[in-house]
Amino acid sequence: MKTQIGIIGAGPAGLTLALLLQKQGINAVILENRSREYVEARVRAGLLEQNTVDLFDELNVSERLHKEGLAHHGMYLSFDGVRHYVPYTKLTKGRATTIYGQQEVVKDLIKACIERGIPIHFETTATAIDGMETSSPTIQFTQNGENQSLTCDFVAACDGYHGIGRKHLPKDSYNEYRIEYPFSWLGILAYAPPSCDELIYSYHENGFALLSLRSPTVSRLYLQVDNGDKIENWSDTAIWDELEKRLHTEGWNLQRGEIFEKGITPMRSFMIDKMQHGRLFLAGDAAHIVPPTGAKGLNLAVADVKILAKGFASYFKKKNIQLLDNYTKTCLKRVWRVQDFSNFMTYLMHKQAPHGSFEYHLQKAKFDYIQYSKAQAMTIAENYVGLKAI
Ligand SMILES: Cc1cc2nc3c(=O)[nH]c(=O)nc-3n(C[C@H](O)[C@H](O)[C@H](O)COP(=O)(O)OP(=O)(O)OC[C@H]3O[C@@H](n4cnc5c(N)ncnc54)[C@H](O)[C@@H]3O)c2cc1C
């Protein structure tokens, strides 16, 4: 098999990249480890920044998103039961976010790829990348138990944190940065109407809680738990009781419903400072992970491939390699900004120190500052909806 861009991974990064390339008349082939059913059912992120929605509009893949997605214009930040509204659309001159599950995004992108003739090979595992320093790198893969290869002009590893792309970068060619947070998120999906029209991020002396939603009938909620905690330790009633306690504010009620999915995810910040080597380019979770407090993972993945697609177009149309040479440098501006914001939100809202301690008061002072400083509220708002400039 031969193509111009060999893409490993049919997540948001790989699929969006293929569609961007197709628009420019550049051929790509996607290799995806899992089945179509599996990737279309994988529940993960759910909040799209304005930039992401704008890009999906440009790609003409947003019809269902606009029909079924829920536009949000602000969020509640709560500390010890005191809730403060951050009207981010008002603070950012009209920019908003949209609630639309990652699995729905993936379904729309796969459908568009197939309709537009982009080959996606599901249940196909990339096993090695050869010849990255030559002009025709090759992806080795297995399909139906057979070893095969895909020769390309460039390889885009959009294969997530556990993929093979990053492992093919020379060990001494990059620095790695990592924070493992001392807490995890217990997340549930429940058939319950949203108890609030906007998201609620809440600090409580028992730990953080987040109320979010996926649709008018499905709520997504999270609790901060200790690392090592087990989902078996939490009955459905215990989860709802704890959510009620941590999200409580005067005169407000939490709507309960049947929990149909629950799991515990560790919180981590991770990145490398070189996202390319020779003709291999990394995008999305393959190169960086952010804690979900800033709701940035999917958005960052899509932002990377927008830059990468521009680089490939410039190379194939103008024989200009400069944008590709600068790929890492251009991406890192946004990655570092997003890492900082996600880390800021994580430390702002999670319980890390005993209630009433010096550290607790510093944390509360940061929260209070948002309430009386428009500048601080605006800083949070513009980061949350996604900066336009980078
Ligand atoms: C459990 C979980 C919950 C999350 N929750 C949130 C959230 O609430 N909010 C938020 O903003 N973000 C969340 N994220 C992060 C967000 O989902 C990711 O940032 C986003 O999926 C990144 O997209 P991607 O395309 O880079 O990677 P992925 O979506 O991981 O896609 C990579 C693809 O590559 C495939 N692949 C891997 N190895 C190979 C191989 N060798 N050969 C072929 N294919 C391969 C994988 O099967 C996968 O389909 C969550 C992530 C996880 C794991």
Image (cartoon, rainbow, N blue to C red):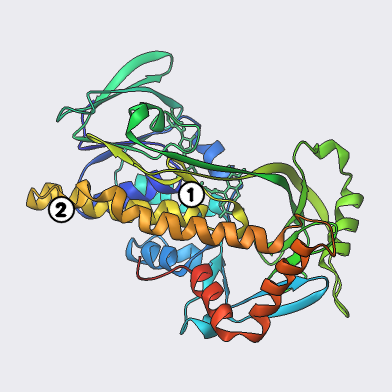
Q: Is residue 192 left or right of residue 11?
A: right
Which secondary structure lies at badge 1? helix
Q: Residue at x 66, y 79 (%)?
A: 369
Q: Which mark is residue 314?
A: 2
Residue 198: x and y, percent? 67, 73
The residue indicated by pointer 1 is 106
Image spot of residue 29 (x, y percent): 30, 36
> How many residues crowd mark 2 within 10 Å: few (<14), some (14–19), many (20+)?
some
Asked which quadrant contains residue 38, the reply is top right
Q: Residue at image x 28%, y 21%?
A: 149
Is label 2 within 8 A of ligand 1 (CB to nearest ligand atom)?
no
**Where 291 sits versus 79, above or below?**
above
Q: Quadrant of residue 335?
A: bottom left
Mark 1: which amino acid? Val
- Callout 2: SS: helix
Circle nearer the viewer, 2 or 1: 2
Task: Say if 12 sits above or below 89 in the image.
Answer: above
Tell me what residue is drawn at x 85 percent, y 65 percent.
356
Q: Front-most of 214 and 119? A: 214
Q: Quadrant of the C terminus?
A: bottom left
Looking at the image, residue 197 lies above or below residue 6: below
Q: As shown in the figure, which amino acid type bears the numbered disc 2?
A: Ser
